[in-house]
Structures are given as C-alpha cells and as structure tokens.
Amino acid sequence: MSWFKGIEFAHPGFFWLFIIIPLMVAWYVWKQRQLQGTLGVPTLKSFAFKKSYTARFRHVGIALRSLAIAALIVALARPQSSLSWQDSTTEGIDIMIASDISGSMLAEDFKPNRLEAGKNIAIDFIKNRPNDRIGLVIFSGESFTQCPLTIDHDVLINVFSDIKNGMIDDGTAIGMGLATAVNRLRTSTAKSKVIILLTDGSNNSGSIPPITAAEIAKQFGVRVYTVGLGTNGYAPYPVPTPMGIQYQRMKVDIDEGTLSKIANITGGKYFRATNNETLRQIYTQIDKLEKAKIDVTQYRRKTEMFLPWAIIALALLSLEFLLKNSLFKGALT
C-alpha cells in the first residue's frame, strides 16, 4: 500500500489486535439479527421515511468504529519514516580503546579480575559518551581490531562484553596493540583522535616496539592515554590444578617507563590504576577530554508518524458519537 511506502513500525506486534475488528463485526451482525427478530411495527405508513433513512445508514456506526480501531492499532504500532538517511555533524571525538587480554589480566587484585573490571568500567565510560565514535582493539601475543570506530554503542558494548582471555595467543604485544589502534585512526578526519591503552605488563611480543608505535601515533596526530593495571607488589593469580583453582602470588611488573614515554611522545598522559576505584577515576579524568566536531555518516533520523493515525481514530470515534446522538439517534448501535 502506497500509504506505508518507506514506513517501518517500532511495535508491529500490535497488528495482532486487528483480530478485534472481525470479532466486533460478527457480534454486530448477530445483534442486528436478534433485533430484527423482536421488532414489531404496527403500521408502515407513518414510518416509511424513517425506515428508508435508517435502512440506508444503519451500518454507518459499525463502519466508523471499525475504521477508528484500525487507525488506533496503526498508531499503537508506531509508524516511523525510514527514508531520512543523511550525513550529520555532532560533537565528539574519535576514541580507540586498546585492551590487554593476556593471561596476567586474570589476576584478582581487581574485582572480579583485571580483565573483567577493565571491561565493566570501560563500558560505563562508553555509555557516558554517546556522541563519540569509539572502537576496540585487543592484544595479547598479537593484536587485532575487535570493533572499528562506530557511533552504534550497543554493538560495541556487546562486542566488548564478549572478549575474554585466550582469544589470541598469550603474550604482551603493547607495540602491536598500539599500532593497530593507530591504523584505525589514521584516516579519521576528527580534530581529536585518542587511544586509551590498558595493560598490566611489559612488551614481550610482536614485531613493532611500543616507542615506534608511539612515534607513528604522533605523526597522525593521535594522543595516547596509557593505563597501567595492577596493585603495588604482588597480586593473587588463579592457577588451575587437578585439585581445582588455587592461587599463587604473582609479582606486578608494569613497564611504567615505557607507558609514560608513549604518553609523553603523543601528548597524552600515563595513569596507574591499582584497583577498581582508581581505574574508574582515571576514566572520569579521560572523560573530560576536549570535544571537537566529527561527521557521522549515514545517520538515520527516524520521524514518528503515529500522531496522524491517532487523530484519525479520534475523529472517526467523535463522528460516530455525534451521528449516534443526533441524526441517527436510536438507529446506530
């Protein structure tokens, strides 16, 4: 139907209510037959005009009522225009989160562990920045892009929630993780390009040294905020054994010198997080970054179109009420 061309419905389940209309019509027909069986007319002469008048319009009420209910059901289904794809400009920056998922991230000096705490707090950070394009890179013995820059944060959060240790070979390839994130930002036209790099160790894998990756980031105007995860001293680390999970004390060994140098080269800042609360505070500080205008391509702006249908339903019901209580008083049911 041309009326619904380019239209989609937010709640199509309401269309099941259309079953009400044939049920209502069936009840109306049954009621009319009952009335016809009991109606007695002493003479036809004096009621000839009234009979002709009501016979012609006696079904107007049920017709108006059926159309009103149909319009109301369409309104409840929330029709929306889906034709307004367009480019849009919004306030924000481009951010890539580069997260270490190596085995040491399972240490439990954070709750429930470093990896899960990092994920949960990062997801809260993402939710608080709805106008930014944000992406995700994960690294361990190597690195890859888990989610490219996107304004669709629901997709990003789902992807972030699913990351876990063991997805790639173990190790700590900080340089590779940083380089992969830079590669995702190098073609960005945003005025502000930021990487948040989280790790709990020292670079021991990968073909790109961290400082080299930092120099590349600087060339592309990418600012890097580095975060070292781990308490001071030793942290409890779960070790699977035939007797179940047992814990051993693991020395926290973060290469703070390298992380600080990466931040300094790129104009960022190095942070040390020793527990959930300090990590949350770090994200709060990063949340205060400057904002710049970015282009969001193919932004879909939906236009609600339920109001005209609701007005039509109200108008039809009002018309039925007026006719029932004026011209056809006593004739419409």
Image (spheres, rainbow, N blue to C red):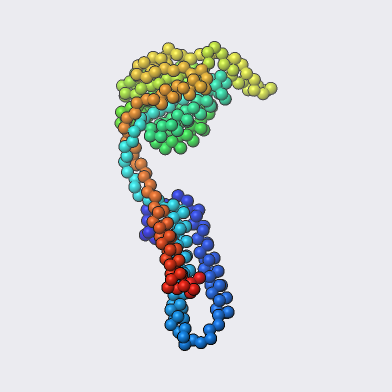
Name which quarter of the figure residue 52 lies in: bottom left
Q: Give whichever of 190, 136 is nearer the camera.
A: 190
Q: Give whichever of 262, 132 is nearer the camera.
A: 132
Query: What x and y, as percent, mark residue 42?
Result: 53, 86
Query: What x and y, as percent, mark residue 49?
Result: 43, 82
Residue 164 vs 200, above or below: the answer is below
> Residue at position x 33%, y 27% from top?
192
Residue 327 vs 192, above or below: the answer is below
* Residue 175 seen: no
> Residue at position x 45%, y 58% from top?
72
Name the residue furthest right. Answer: 243
Q: Quadrant of the N terminus?
A: bottom left
* Residue 151 seen: yes
> Residue at position x 31%, y 28% from top?
191
Number of residue marks: 0
Query: What x and y, as percent, mark residue 35?
Result: 55, 76
Residue 72 vs 208, above or below: the answer is below
Q: Give whichever of 248, 86 is nearer the camera.
A: 86
Query: What x and y, as percent, mark residue 184?
Result: 37, 29
> Residue at position x 49%, y 86% from top?
44
Residue 156 vs 282, above or below: the answer is below
Q: Is residue 155 left or right of residue 91?
A: right
